[in-house]
Amino acid sequence: MEALSTLLNPKILIIFGIILILGIVFDIILVKIFNKWVEYKYKELELKKYDIDIHLNVTKDIETRLDTIIESCFQEYSLMNLIYKTDWYIKEEDEIKISKDICALVSDRISPVMLQQLSLYYNEDAIYDIIGKRVYFKVTNFVIEHNKTSL
């Protein structure tokens, strides 16, 4: 009984409460410091991610790389979808579908770094339009050549 009365002593309860409150405050401060550190590291990584862009010399080589990606996607699409249709006359609807499919392939493949480089060379709002037109010209040339032999 004496031990229980000692634990229920108001002075001991106040000291225990203060220790508990100090522990909670200390935990809150540690969490805030940790969150600030994580935020700082995240921003540091973001800066490093774009560090490569700062040191790039954007030249006409970017157009060649874009054409290479478009050509690669066109070749892949041709092998997967068009190679077995040698006697097939390509209509306008088919041409539009081919263009859309290849544009989707190019959009999936183009890297964020290359998009950054293109936005340094072209107007950022026009990049997808430029890609679409290049794909359209590639597909139109293919359709013209293909339909000549299909007639």
Image: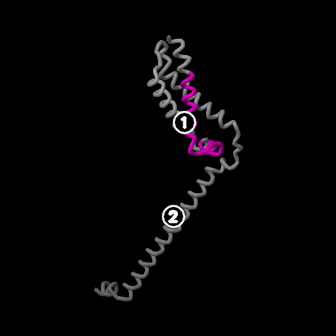
Q: Nearer the viewer, residue 54 or 48?
A: 54
**Which picture quadrant has residue 130?**
top right
Q: Nearer the viewer, residue 52 or 94?
A: 94
Q: Nearer the viewer, residue 123 or 36?
A: 123
Residue 19: percent from left, percent from top: 43, 80
Query: Label 2 neighbourhood size at 10 Å, few (<14), some (14-19), many (20+)?
Result: few
Q: CA distance from mark 1 to mark 2?
A: 35 Å
Residue 61: percent from left, percent from top: 69, 36
Instruction: Identify whether 2 is placed above or below 107.
Output: below
Residue 146 within the magenta-colored segment of the rendering = no
Judged from the image, the secondary structure of the residue bearing numbered disc 2 is helix
Query: Label 1 neighbourhood size at 10 Å, few (<14), some (14-19), many (20+)?
Result: few
Looking at the rendered structure, the kind of residue marked 1 is: Arg
Q: What quarter of the picture does the N terminus occupy?
A: bottom left
Judged from the image, the secondary structure of the residue bearing numbered disc 1 is helix
Looking at the rendered structure, the kind of residue marked 2 is: Asn
Q: Residue at x 41, y 84 (%)?
A: 15
| Mark identifier at residue 35 | 2
Q: Residue at x 68, y 50 (%)?
A: 54
Colour mapping: one colour
Q: Residue furthest left?
A: 1
* Badge 1 or badge 2: first in the primary sequence: 2
Which residue is denoted by mark 1 in the rendering?
109
Helix, strand or loop for the magenta stretch, by majority: helix
Left or right of 60? Residue 76 is left
Residue 151: percent from left, percent from top: 50, 10
Residue 17: percent from left, percent from top: 39, 81
Disc tally is 2
Q: Residue at x 54, y 65 (%)?
A: 36
Instruction: Identify whether 84 is placed above or below 69.
Output: above
- Please state the extent of the stretch shown in magenta in the rendering: 115-141
